[in-house]
Amino acid sequence: MRSVSADNFLLNGTSVIRIYQSLSGEKVLLFSSDQPGGNATLEITGAAGIDLEATLDTTITFYLTSIGCSDGCEVQAFDERGLSPLNGRIVSMIGFITVPPGIFQPSYSSIYVQALDGCGVNVFSYDVPSPRPELGDLVLVTGQVEEYSGASAGSTTEISMSSPSALTILSRHYPEPDALVLRTGEVGAEENEGRLIQTQGAIIRASDHDFYIDDGSGGIQIYQNFTSIEFSRYKVGMYVRVKGVVLQYDYTKPFLESYELVPRFESDITIIEDAFPEDVVLKGDAHVFCPSCGEETYRIGFGATASSRVVIRIFDVAGRLVRTLYSGESVGRSEVLWDGTGDDGKPVPPGLYICFIEVIERGSGKMMTKSMPIVVGTELR
């Protein structure tokens, strides 16, 4: 674990907020103080429990420097236009490097830093800092918050450093921050810009420089951004797990669209075997679905073979179409939720309904179907 218990540390009688231990065993203490610019006392007790050399209680006196640091989520906050409220301001931020220089932008120094609160930000300078930052380094960066738009980026929130010396390496050789695991349909959101994300799904569209994956919740573009990753090996019908940083390429106000997940290394993409069932799957909970009783949704699990087209519909007992719940490529095993309304948005009357799945294999044209009943009830008054 990178984070170490801070229970044994007191700064002026107040608990230290966080302690990090590098892979080499080095420890860094991060804390905030209401009285910067003066002497402080750090008390260490029970040190044996956290693998320090000293096992006795000890007190260290030192001088507090004044550095006002912003959280990553403060920098990445956005208004109704999709712009950071800190745009144009000089900020300092502490975090771990998730994308070292030379990965996403070979001509300049484009570094991604994930702050301690989990939000990530692009840190830009024309020259690479020295010593060269590496993946997992804990750094302090200072620069101006900008919303950059250019030939290769649109509305990218970044901290632009006036010189490479505005980046200070506090400690080296940490494991990279844990990626936030989301469904594919949750990745493309403004609050995720710059963050390290992991998701997985079926490839529903592919080219030599990008592909789209979907787990049934909505698709996200996976993009090759100046990296040497060979995208041509990833084909429609494969099921993959992808880790990367969310970038934005939106040139139209408000800047709240056009996101893509960008892997950094070959190891960020994993092909998952046996993700698709060999036959059609359709299942639901064996109970009466009662929206008027406060039950919001009925959960329907489904699955289909790879490289096939899937449509899931609800019919009434007279065979009339009530609702189309899903129409798209096979995404392996997934689920959809029915809220008890028809395509017109109105609640359906109580009664028996039929959920019907239709699967058409793209290569052979073979059609497979399956159905199941759903009983919609009502609250007795």
Image (cartoon, grey):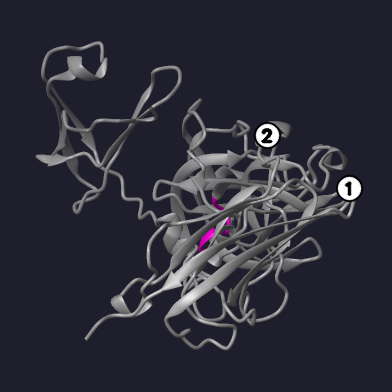
Figure check: 332 above or below 329: above
236 or 346, which lies in front? 346
Q: Quadrant of the N terminus?
A: top left
Q: Amino acid at mark 1?
A: Asp
Picture disc at residue 274: 2
Q: Nearer the viewer, residue 164 or 95?
A: 95
Q: Quadrant of residue 320?
A: bottom right
Which is more N-terminal, label 2 or label 1?
Answer: 1
Mark 2 crowd level (few <14, some 14–19, many ≥20, 10 Å Cα): few
Coordinates of residue 150 in the picture (x, y in percent): 76, 66
Question: Is 92 included in the stretch rendered in magenta?
Answer: no
Q: Residue at x 57, y 59 (%)?
A: 193
Which quadrant is home to the C terminus? bottom left
Residue 161 visible? The answer is no
Q: Is residue 368 left or right of residue 89?
A: right
- Please provide percent x and percent y for residue 247: 65, 57
Q: Amino acid at mark 2?
A: Asp
Specify whether 335 is left or right of 358: left
Q: Which residue is mark 1?
A: 208
- The foreground one among 316 and 298 is 316
Q: Position of residue 14 (x, y in %)?
A: 13, 42
* Residue 379: percent from left, percent from top: 28, 80
**Start-end of magenta stretch:** 191-195
| Residue 343 falls left or right of residue 295 | right
* Residue 369 visible in this rendered orientation of the protein: yes
